[in-house]
Image (cartoon, rainbow, N blue to C red):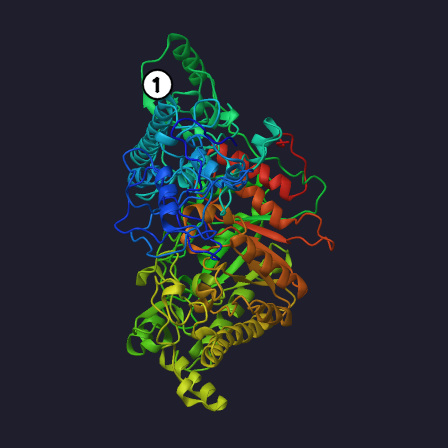
């Protein structure tokens, strides 16, 4: 690098003093002393070769610029050597200036004074280019600091050593000199353009959020960032958005548009692959499942963000986002705005509106030739009323004929304890069910019968009210401890407590004796249906909703999804059993329920019992949960023993509920309160499978149609994983050698839900060829017989039977 030799150029060594041996370089605010204001006191002169102080003073003044001659200097000067030492100039990254400057009185170190050109704001040294890609990406993505910080940092750009002042600058072409005023002006203009682009991006994001909240019913938080906006729009367009932010088209879009690469959602507008088959709708509510396609209003245009002027802005944008003027950018970053339309565009929109658009579907697996899985349909809950009559018998017969024509194998019927033994103990009225079963036999359909020892009403999907037998509720008024009870003392009249299984509190009979008498009466009354194999299976109700579980999440007590529920063990009989278990263990203080388990709608991490590292994993917690879940297993053991006596040689089954919320947490709190001791370090379904295997009972599991991604989209705070739960339960049952059936937990009419059921019913590439032995569809209704819904259902039945269908989506 050249050294200036013009008039007034300094030919001596001029540097700011710095402590020797520190290994540090001078900060930027320590300016070189050529042309600097003198300090309040002079520095100690440098002595060399025995020269006097007068000679040193003369040399010092010779280096000073005009106007400063005769003043004391903070630097000293030495005659230049023949060879100019090499100086390593390092660019530094921007750092905020500290308010307090260090104080020191260091020795003086001489270096040659050189002239350097100013460091433009837009340029970078080789070291900066090697070490600063993160800064480039931040500027590219619009991630900048506040304007006040930029103004403060403007003074800190450049090298650690600033160029010498104009008075000692070298002439052009020889050394360097001050920056060109035009370059400084261009740098300031570029900075202003950068600020403008950032303001535009923020304004566009604000309009996107406002439009989505007002017109699209998107559940975006008030300060949502661009990641959340892109994720919401991607889901609405039918794309798949993983929990970590990865976004990619669905399988159908991948088939129509080969080779899309997964794109990680970042804090900047990303140019994602677009497809005309995935338009963004303008105004529409968000559905529970991602809708892959809906037409947008013809009067709405999707406007892309305004383009920033300048070549720098164009070069910083990814090529995929660089579209010509008048074109449309990525539909994931567009906002529907009503604007005047070009006639040609309006004509195209009108044509598109007339042509019905078909939603793209993911590729489907071909189930032709797979094992035959029978399909049953659950009849309405109130198909037989308390008077023993079949409700709307003629309409029901017509619906059953349609189901038979569609290939359905049979139906499932609930035999309600409250209807049959309604008024007096051991007086059974089977009239309505006899007529119903006769209708089903004439249509050559099979029957699955549920022994429903619970009340109907108050749960999801209950459209009728069928209480427990009147004589049982009369006993409950005088002795409410026959019902399950929560910590606050609220009674749940949905079913009887398991604490009275061996207590003679039901007019001289125990609860299991009452259940056995009911099942034996049914077996005698419908013996001919067993002989003719019309009744293919008996499902034994073992708890709330006919499922093997505690009534831990009752809607009548204010529970709402995804609350963890509450333990139901505070009736007198279960508390007596708990005290006995604690005494046998030798810790009578453990004869109590948890006092820090929250309430029905609590979250696990907000309780002391279910949080990570909480009391559920303590000595007391493990004792209590073992006892609580063992009461459930013992109840199943007692009732199934008598059921096997009543239905000897027949197929019996037990339904287990799919409590899939909070499955991704360590404690699995909702499962614990329901009686399934299934935390992350324990298999809570193996003991249940063992007791079912003991009595050769099949396992009927729910929620096989649910998808984890859908649950995450609707209730991300629930940490639900229905797919993981289904996998665990089915494998636990298959490992125990059980037959496994299933049913859907919620109404299902779409192809995606049916495909999920098929995948669970016939696992792909299972080495043992395991599959479900039956599926029950919930439930018969008028909505099912609507043309598009019934078409999908009939198609589903054929594939469950292993038949080929012609409209498989490749």
Up the image or down, 327 lies above or below 789; here it is above
Farthest-out residue, left: 40
Foreground: 798 or 392?
798
Farthest-out residue, top: 343
Residue drawn at point x = 45 percent, y = 59 percent: 662
Foreground: 484 or 784?
484
Residue 235 in view in this figure:
yes
Residue drawn at point x = 39 percent, y = 12 percent: 346
Residue 2 shown left or right of residue 592 in the figure: right
Question: Residue 665: x percent and y percent?
Answer: 48, 61
Up the image or down, 356 lies above or below 151; here it is above
Foreground: 280 or 513?
280
Q: How many marks?
A: 1
Residue 383 in view in this figure:
no
Question: Residue 700: x percent and y percent?
Answer: 56, 59
Question: Residue 416: x percent and y percent?
Answer: 43, 61
Farthest-out residue, right: 767
Question: Mark 1 Cα within 10 Å, few/some/many (few <14, many 20+)?
Answer: some
Residue 386, image quadrant: bottom left
Question: Residue 431: x percent and y percent?
Answer: 45, 58
Residue 741, image quadrant: bottom right
Residue 40 shown left or right of residue 89 in the figure: left
Foreground: 668 or 446?
668
Residue 252 shown left or right of residue 282 in the figure: right
Q: Secondary structure at mark 1?
A: loop
Q: Identify the residue under disc 1.
A: 299
Up the image or down, 388 lies above or below 300; here it is below
Task: Classify the position of the C terminus by image quarter.
Answer: top right
């Amino acid at each position: 690098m050249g050294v200036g030799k013009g008039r007034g150029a300094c030919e001596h060594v001029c540097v700011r003093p710095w402590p020797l041996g520190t290994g540090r370089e001078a900060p930027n605010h320590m300016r070189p002393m050529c042309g600097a204001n003198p300090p309040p006191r002079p520095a100690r002169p440098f002595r060399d070769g025995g020269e006097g102080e007068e000679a040193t003073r003369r040399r010092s003044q010779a280096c000073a610029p005009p106007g400063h001659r005769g003043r004391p200097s903070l630097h000293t000067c030495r005659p230049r050597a023949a060879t100019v030492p090499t100086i390593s100039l390092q660019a530094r990254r921007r750092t905020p200036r500290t308010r307090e400057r260090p104080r020191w009185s260091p020795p003086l170190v001489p270096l040659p004074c050189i002239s350097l050109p100013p460091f433009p704001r837009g340029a970078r040294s080789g070291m900066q280019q090697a070490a600063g890609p993160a800064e480039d990406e931040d500027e590219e993505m619009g991630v900048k600091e506040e304007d006040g910080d930029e103004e403060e940092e403007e003074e800190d750009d450049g090298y650690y050593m600033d160029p010498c002042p104009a008075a000692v600058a070298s002439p052009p072409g020889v050394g360097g000199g001050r920056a060109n005023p035009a370059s400084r002006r261009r740098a300031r203009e570029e900075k202003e353009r950068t600020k403008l682009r950032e303001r535009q991006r923020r304004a566009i994001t604000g309009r996107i959020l406002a439009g989505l909240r007002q017109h699209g019913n998107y559940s975006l938080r008030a300060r949502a960032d661009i990641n959340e906006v892109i994720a919401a729009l991607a889901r609405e367009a039918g794309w798949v958005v993983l929990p970590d932010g990865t976004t990619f088209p669905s399988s159908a879009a991948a088939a129509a548009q080969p080779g899309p690469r997964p794109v990680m959602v970042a804090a900047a507008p990303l140019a994602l692959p677009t497809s005309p088959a995935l338009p963004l709708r303008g105004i529409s509510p968000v559905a529970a499942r991602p809708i892959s396609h809906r037409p947008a209003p013809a009067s709405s245009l999707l406007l892309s963000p305004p383009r920033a002027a300048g070549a720098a802005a164009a070069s910083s944008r990814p090529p995929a986002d660089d579209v010509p003027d008048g074109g449309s950018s990525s539909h994931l970053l567009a906002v529907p705005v009503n604007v005047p339309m070009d006639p040609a565009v309006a004509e195209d929109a009108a044509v598109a509106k007339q042509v019905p658009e078909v939603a793209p579907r993911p590729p489907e697996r071909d189930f032709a030739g797979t094992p035959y899985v029978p399909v049953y349909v659950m009849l309405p809950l109130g198909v037989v009323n308390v008077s023993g009559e079949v409700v709307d018998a003629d309409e029901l017969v017509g619906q059953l004929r349609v189901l038979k024509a569609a290939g359905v194998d049979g139906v499932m019927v609930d035999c309600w304890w409250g209807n049959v033994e309604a008024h007096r103990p051991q007086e059974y009225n089977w009239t309505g069910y006899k007529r119903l079963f006769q209708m089903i036999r004439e249509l050559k359909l099979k029957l699955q019968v549920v022994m429903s020892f619970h009340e109907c009403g108050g749960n999801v999907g209950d459209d009728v009210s069928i209480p427990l037998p009147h004589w049982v509720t009369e006993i409950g008024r005088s002795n409410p401890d026959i019902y399950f009870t929560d910590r606050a003392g609220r009674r749940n009249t949905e079913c009887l407590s398991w604490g009275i299984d061996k207590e003679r509190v039901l007019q001289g009979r125990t609860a299991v004796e009452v259940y056995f008498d009911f099942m034996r009466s049914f077996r005698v009354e419908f013996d001919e249906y067993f002989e003719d194999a019309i009744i293919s299976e008996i499902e034994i109700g073992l708890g709330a909703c006919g499922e093997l579980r505690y009534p831990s999440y009752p809607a009548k007590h204010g529970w709402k999804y995804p609350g963890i529920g509450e333990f139901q063990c505070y009736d007198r009989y279960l508390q007596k059993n708990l005290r006995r278990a604690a005494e046998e263990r030798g810790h009578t203080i453990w004869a109590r329920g948890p006092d820090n388990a929250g309430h029905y709608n609590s979250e696990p991490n907000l309780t002391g019992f279910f949080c990570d590292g909480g009391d559920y994993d303590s000595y007391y917690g493990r004792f209590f949960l073992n006892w609580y879940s063992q009461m459930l297993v013992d109840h199943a053991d007692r009732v199934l023993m008598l059921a096997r006596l009543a239905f000897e040689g027949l197929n019996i089954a037990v339904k287990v509920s799919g409590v899939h919320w909070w499955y991704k947490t360590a404690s699995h709190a909702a499962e614990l309160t329901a009686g399934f001791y299934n935390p992350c370090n324990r298999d809570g379904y193996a003991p249940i499978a063992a007791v079912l295997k003991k009595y050769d009972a099949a396992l009927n599991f729910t929620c096989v149609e649910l998808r984890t991604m859908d649950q995450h989209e609707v209730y991300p705070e629930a940490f639900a994983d229905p797919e993981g739960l289904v996998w665990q339960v089915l494998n636990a049952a298959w490992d125990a050698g059980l037959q496994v059936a299933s049913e859907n937990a919620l109404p299902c009419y779409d192809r995606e839900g049916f495909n999920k059921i098929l995948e669970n019913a016939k696992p792909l590439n299972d080495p043992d060829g395991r599959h479900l032995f039956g599926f029950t569809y919930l439930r018969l209704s008028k909505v099912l017989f609507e043309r598009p819904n019934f078409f999908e259902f009939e198609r589903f039945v054929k594939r469950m039977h292993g038949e080929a269908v012609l409209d498989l989506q490749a």
